[in-house]
Image (tube, grey):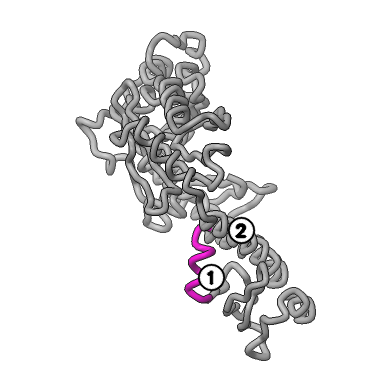
Amino acid sequence: MAGSGALLRQCPLLLPQNREGTAYEGFVTAQGRDFHIRILLPMDFQLKNARIECSWHLKKILHGYRHILKQRLHSCPDLVSFMVELKTVLEIALKNTQDLHIPRPPEYYSCLVRDLEILGWNKVAYVDTGLTAIKLKAEDSSGRQHLIALKLNAKYPTEPPDCLVDFPVQFAISWMPQNSLIDIYNQFLAALESLKEFWDAMDEIDGKTWVLEPENPTRSATTRRIAIGNNVSVNIEVDPRHPNMLPECYFLGADHVVNPLRIKLNNNMHSWDPEISLLQNLKDLLEIDFPSRAVLEKSDFAKDCGICYAYRLDGAPPDQVCDDPRCGQPFHWACLYEWLQGLPSSRQSFNVIFGDCPYCNKVRKSNGNE
């Protein structure tokens, strides 16, 4: 832990509450305002396990920055460093909060309402009570529904609104002071059509195969982990700008199963046909039929880890499989690595550890950097 003097200089109103230095209470100051806060540290002073209590007002201001503060708790070496980060985040949060409450001139409302009427209220999915946040809805030529969220500042339309979309690529609008919501909406529609082939390809995969990851893919997701068989899958990364080109492929499973698939992919790569669908190309190159959703259930492929007995660990399913064809037990790499580290008979070469499979006792390995 950093010295109490450094903490006192940084936060003179935050005082220790015990001799151990595990409890602090007082105020953090930002933009001339004091906010009540209480910090409880564990006995080992690990910030990632600290508990922070604050006033409801401060909690409301920092609500949208919780993930950032959580990251800072994990990365900062001591409490002094974290308090510096906290004050910086609080300064930004206060500035953004003030921007939201800047009084809008009458011209702002009349201009915005006129733009919404010209655009059509049937295209509006949501408007907040202060007329500062709007969601517009649109349908692409394949019938998919999409939303664009707009956050308008007090200088609209001189300055463009902030736009948030669920796209796999960056959406940057072209804007001039004479532009309006109609111009943003038309650019949104054009962007939707430019991504039509990408979403068509991903929808076909989602509809005709068993996708293990992500569980609930968003429109911005460019990866799919597709089940091939029991404890065998392929993870593909699709280029949203060129969805009909060969994607990056990474096979997961026992070596005796995935090695033949890698060989087929390499040997047949030249026959990739951009005129046919991504899914059909994968079938042709790998010379397989992916398990059908009409015949099999996802549970046929989603096998629990043989060590922690859970399917997901930190959101990830098992990605290691015993190479013995008679075993084939799946594991999370973190579980397997920890298991092998604890075996007296295991041996390690650099960051690769070798040891017996917990199920069949066959020697297998795990990479600590996976």
| Foreground tag (1 vs 2) | 2
Residue 126 or 209: which is nearer the viewer? 126
Q: How crowded is mark 1: few (under 14 residues within 10 Å), some or many (20 or more)?
A: some
Residue 367 drawn above or below residue 253: below
Image: 76 above or below 367: below
Answer whether residue 55 is magenta in the image.
yes
**Residue 261 on image: x %, y %:** 45, 24
Name the image quarter holding residue 221: top left
Residue located at (40% from left, 22% from top): 196
Residue 347 left/right relative to 302: right
Which residue is depicted at the point 79% across and 81% down?
A: 5
Query: Judging from the image, what secondary structure is the residue with disc 2 in?
Result: helix
Type of the residue with mark 2: Lys
Q: Do the residues labelled 1 and 2 touch (CB within 8 Å)?
A: no
Query: Which of pointers 1 and 2 lies earlier in the amino acid sequence?
Result: 1
Q: Is residue 103 above or below residue 272?
A: below
Residue 349 at x, y percent in the picture: 68, 47
Answer above or below: position of 254 versus 103.
Answer: above
Whether residue 229 is visible to the viewer of this picture, yes or no, is no
Q: Distance between the residues labelled 1 and 2?
A: 14 Å
Which segment did they paint magenta?
53-64
352 sits to left or right of 66: right
Q: Which of 215 and 234 is in front in this view?
A: 215
Q: Give the residue type that dot 1 points to.
A: Leu
The image quarter containing residue 217 is top left
Which of the image's four quarters has the N terminus? Answer: bottom right
Q: Give the residue at mark 1.
A: 58
Determine which residue is flagged by label 2: 95
Dividing the image into 4 quarters, which one contains the C terminus? top right
Q: Does the magenta stretch include residue 290?
A: no
- Residue pictured at 53% horizontal, 63% vertical: 62
Image location (x, y in percent) of residue 298: 28, 40
